[in-house]
Structures are given as C-alpha cells and as structure tokens.
Image (cartoon, grey):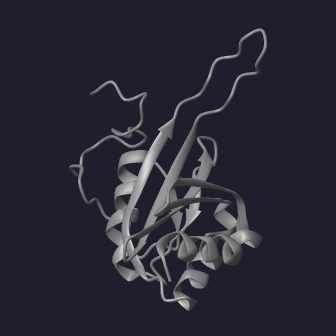
Amino acid sequence: MNTPATLQSFETILAPYTERFNWRDDYRLDAYIAPAHLLEVIQTLHQHEWRYLAAMTGLDIPPVAATESTPEAEGQIEVLYQFCEGPCILTLRVTVPYSQPVIPSVCGLIPPATLYEREMIEMFGVEITNTPSTARLLLPDDWPDGVYPLRKSFKGL
C-alpha cells in the first residue's frame, strides 16, 4: 500500500475517536483527539500493527488576552505522540488546558513511554495518571514545584 493510501485508511479507522484531521504532507497526518480517547486510539493503532512511538513532544500554547473582538483564551498544553510506520508519520495531538493538564499514561500499551511521560511531567507540568514512575528525570531534586522550564512563561530562576 502506498503512503497516502495507508494514512487515508487510518483516517477512516480513527474517525470515531478524532475531532479533526490535518494532512501535513502526503506522508504526514495529524489526528486531533480528546484525552479520553487516547488509549482507545493507541489500542486501535496496535491492532493495525502500528507500534512504533517515535517521539512524544509537548507544545505550550500560552493564554491569549481578550480584545474587543475575541474573548480571553486559557493557555493549553498540547501533547503530540508521533507514530511511524515505514515512511508514514501519524501524529496524535492531545490538548489539555492549563487549569486541568491531565492525560492518561500510555505505558500500559507502550512501556518505554515512561521516559517521555516523565519529561512531560517535569518540563510542562502535565499530570499523567497511572504512569509507573514520576521520579525526576531531567531536573535536579531541589527544583521548585510548579516551575516548568519548557512553558513559555518560564523566565528562569
């Protein structure tokens, strides 16, 4: 099966769980999903032999001040799960608000993801439920609680 056809098949398979899709190129598809559907989507990928989690990345989307024409928008953290199969890249994009940055752990399905999850906890302040380890990975043990160095609001200590 060629690359666009492979990703188009996943667009169909994941449609029940997905808010929307965005094609980045013939070989890259982004699927926007709610945190509640994350584990179902990954189980579906596994059922179709997509098991390679290449990266888990965080993006900080800071709050937007209100203007005359738009209301104030709360800041968000977007967690990206990049899965690869040959030349195809499927990115699951899960967005959570600053006020409740909680996602489920994927370690029950992808055990090595614990390193990525620990990084999300430390660097972005995302709470990951049922993750096997919350031990510090990158920051020193005396790092202050509530200070997340990869958030755009971080100005240093």
**Residue at image location 31% in from the left, 64% down from the top:** 135
Location of residue 13 (image quadrant): bottom right
Residue 11 in the image, given as x and y percentages of width and height: 65, 70
**Residue at image location 56% in from the left, 56% down from the top:** 93
Location of residue 65 (image quadrant): top right
- Horizontal side of residue 97 vs 25, given as left or right: right
Image: 52 above or below 31: below
- Horizontal side of residue 7 vs 89, given as left or right: right
| Viewer-nearest residue: 89 or 55 | 89
**Looking at the image, can residue 133 be seen?**
no
| Viewer-nearest residue: 114 or 59 | 59
The count of marks equals: 0
| Viewer-nearest residue: 104 or 7 | 7
Residue 87 in the image, given as x and y percentages of width and height: 37, 71
Which corner quadrant holds the C terminus?
top left
Residue 153 in the image, given as x and y percentages of width and height: 43, 27
**Residue at image location 34% in from the left, 57% down from the top:** 119
